[in-house]
Image (cartoon, rainbow, N blue to C red):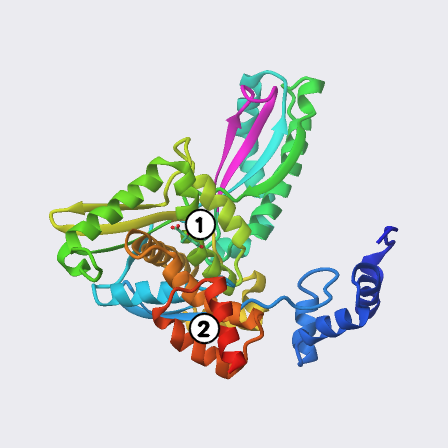
């Protein structure tokens, strides 16, 4: 590709495919075939996907799987997960089963507050600005009445608008720090529409505020946008059981419980471990967030900021032993929606929500937090007992065999063979060659 393309977005889908195939790939014919192979056979479904984003040329599949047997607050759930990593769903299912026999998971909502900010520059008299804000606040609220009307009818809307002075960080920098209740919607569009109107009204009101000098009247709005940091949109999920009920491994139940708590404490104390520990949690969280049509990038950004809220990146989960009881829990911020966005558009998202009994956003927060906790339990349990590679490589075996071109019957034979053998690239290759040479 040696020349830029003009007006790519205006080309038809076929023209886009022609362009990409001829300019960026060695075998244009094969490229076109491959892209088409992933189109949906129903043109209406394909059109839907084409229109989710710009310049769509095909679909990118991820496996959509089910982790059953999650007992959460006394209700049984089968949790849909969209993820490519081999051992995640198996690990989630295993953890669900383990806790099913020990009272299940408990989850509770600690808050549902969303945040948005209007960032602006004002270099004048601060006392005048706070007097102005006291007068302008009701006008700001009034100016978004048409946007908030239906949200308010359902019990949500704007919680508060605060004037925050951050001029010690950047000269003249202040904010309208706004908090929202968006109920079952993730709320990004609602929040951003409110903020953009606040920004307009702020400028208009400032121009009309007589106590300001001409310079003070010209408030410079830099930007208006929601924050994906939602420390008060928080959910807690936990499991607990008498230590004696943990005894399912090679070591004693006490030794296992203590080693498990130590492993979690290492993740609390040490960022290198904390990042990987939390990555394992996000294996569960992202997979459910994605399957239910939510924005996993927003969730990721907010969760990691929360993990660093004390000034050092740390574990999202906690574990302790108290009076012979093992307790393991997670506290995690999750801004999720079960209405709007992809939830009513993407057929598989609709199905995922139906499988979850059409949860409210609060219920979904609980389910997602539980998926994260279960994933972390499974990972730490493996790490402090057998090590992670045993289970992981077993799950990866099929990927390896597919890559090596094994037939269905070879795969079947080798899956049985590797039940009690160590899986490595070399050992799988050797075993496959042996079968093929017979
Ligand atoms: C792999 O995707 C996730 C783990 O590394 C998580 C962990 O180390 O806790 C197994």
Question: Which span of residues is magenta-colored?
Answer: 158-179
Give the answer, above or below, for where 317 lies relative to 309. below
Q: Is residue 87 magenta?
A: no
Q: Horizontal and vertical percent for residue 269?
A: 34, 35
Instruction: Look at 66% across and 77% down and name the residue there.
Output: 40
Residue 354 is labelled as: 2
What secondary structure is the stretch in magenta mostly built from?
A: strand
Quarter occupied by the N terminus = bottom right
Q: Horizontal and vertical percent for residue 74?
A: 26, 66
Sequence-earlier tag: 2 or 1: 1
Label 1, on which residue? 279
In this rendering, position of residue 89 left or right of residue 227 = left
Dot 2: what SS?
A: helix
Q: Nearer the viewer, residue 165 or 402?
A: 402
Give the answer, above or below, for where 110 lies relative to 86. above
Instruction: Look at 71% across and 19% down and name the residue there.
Output: 214
Instruction: Look at 39% across and 64% down and name the residue there.
Output: 422
Q: Is mark 1 within 8 Å of ligand 1?
A: yes
Q: Horizontal and vertical percent for residue 131?
A: 54, 23
Determine which quarter of the picture holds residue 11.
bottom right
Q: Is residue 223 visible?
A: yes
Q: Is mark 2 within 8 Å of ligand 1?
A: no
Instruction: Look at 57% across and 64% down and name the residue there.
Output: 342
In this rendering, position of residue 246 left or right of residue 155 = left
Bin the neighbour count of mark 1 within 10 Å (Cα to Cα): few under 14, some 14-19, many 20 and up. some
Q: Nearer the viewer, residue 174 or 208?
A: 174
Dot 1: what SS?
A: helix
The reply to whether dot 2 and dot 1 touch (C-beta < 8 Å) is: no
Marks 2/1: CA–CA distance: 28 Å
């Amino acid at each position: 590709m040696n020349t830029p393309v003009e007006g790519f977005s205006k080309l038809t889908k076929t023209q886009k495919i022609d362009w990409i195939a001829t300019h960026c790939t060695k075998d244009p014919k094969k490229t076109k075939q491959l892209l088409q192979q992933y189109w949906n056979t129903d043109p209406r479904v394909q059109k839907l996907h084409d229109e989710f984003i710009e310049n769509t040329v095909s679909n990118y599949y991820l496996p959509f799987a089910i982790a059953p047997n999650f007992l959460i607050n006394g209700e049984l759930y089968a949790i849909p997960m969209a993820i490519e990593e081999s051992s995640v769903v198996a690990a989630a299912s295993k953890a669900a089963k383990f806790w099913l026999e020990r009272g299940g998971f408990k989850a509770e909502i600690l808050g549902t507050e969303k945040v948005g900010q209007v960032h602006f520059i004002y270099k004048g008299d601060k006392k005048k600005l706070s007097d102005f804000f006291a007068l302008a606040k009701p006008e700001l609220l009034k100016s978004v009445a048409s946007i908030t009307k239906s949200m308010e009818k359902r019990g949500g809307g704007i919680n508060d608008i605060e004037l925050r002075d951050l001029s010690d960080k950047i000269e003249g920098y202040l904010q309208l720090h706004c908090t929202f209740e968006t109920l079952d919607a993730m709320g990004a569009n609602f929040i951003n529409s409110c903020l953009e109107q606040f920004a307009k009204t702020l400028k208009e009101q400032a121009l009309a505020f007589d106590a300001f000098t001409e310079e003070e009247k010209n408030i410079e709005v830099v930007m208006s946008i929601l924050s994906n940091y939602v420390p008060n949109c928080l959910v807690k999920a936990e499991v607990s059981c008498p230590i004696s009920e943990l005894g399912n491994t090679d070591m004693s139940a006490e030794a296992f419980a203590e080693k498990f708590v130590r492993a979690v404490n290492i993740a609390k104390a040490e960022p290198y471990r904390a990042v990987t520990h939390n990555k394992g949690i996000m294996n569960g969280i992202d997979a459910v967030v994605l399957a239910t049509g939510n924005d996993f990038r927003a969730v990721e950004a907010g969760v990691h900021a929360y993990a660093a809220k004390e000034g050092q990146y740390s574990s999202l989960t906690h574990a302790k032993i108290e009076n012979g009881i093992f307790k393991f829990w997670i506290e995690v911020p999750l801004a999720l929606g079960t209405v709007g966005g992809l939830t009513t558009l993407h057929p598989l998202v609709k199905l995922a929500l139906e499988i979850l009994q059409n949860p409210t956003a609060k219920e979904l927060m609980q389910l997602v937090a539980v998926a994260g906790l279960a994933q972390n339990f499974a990972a730490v349990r493996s790490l402090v007992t057998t090590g992670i590679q045993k289970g992981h490589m077993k799950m990866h075996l099929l990927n390896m065999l597919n890559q090596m071109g094994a037939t269905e019957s070879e795969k079947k034979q080798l899956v049985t063979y590797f039940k009690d053998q160590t899986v490595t690239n070399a050992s799988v290759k050797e075993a496959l060659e042996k079968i093929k040479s017979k």
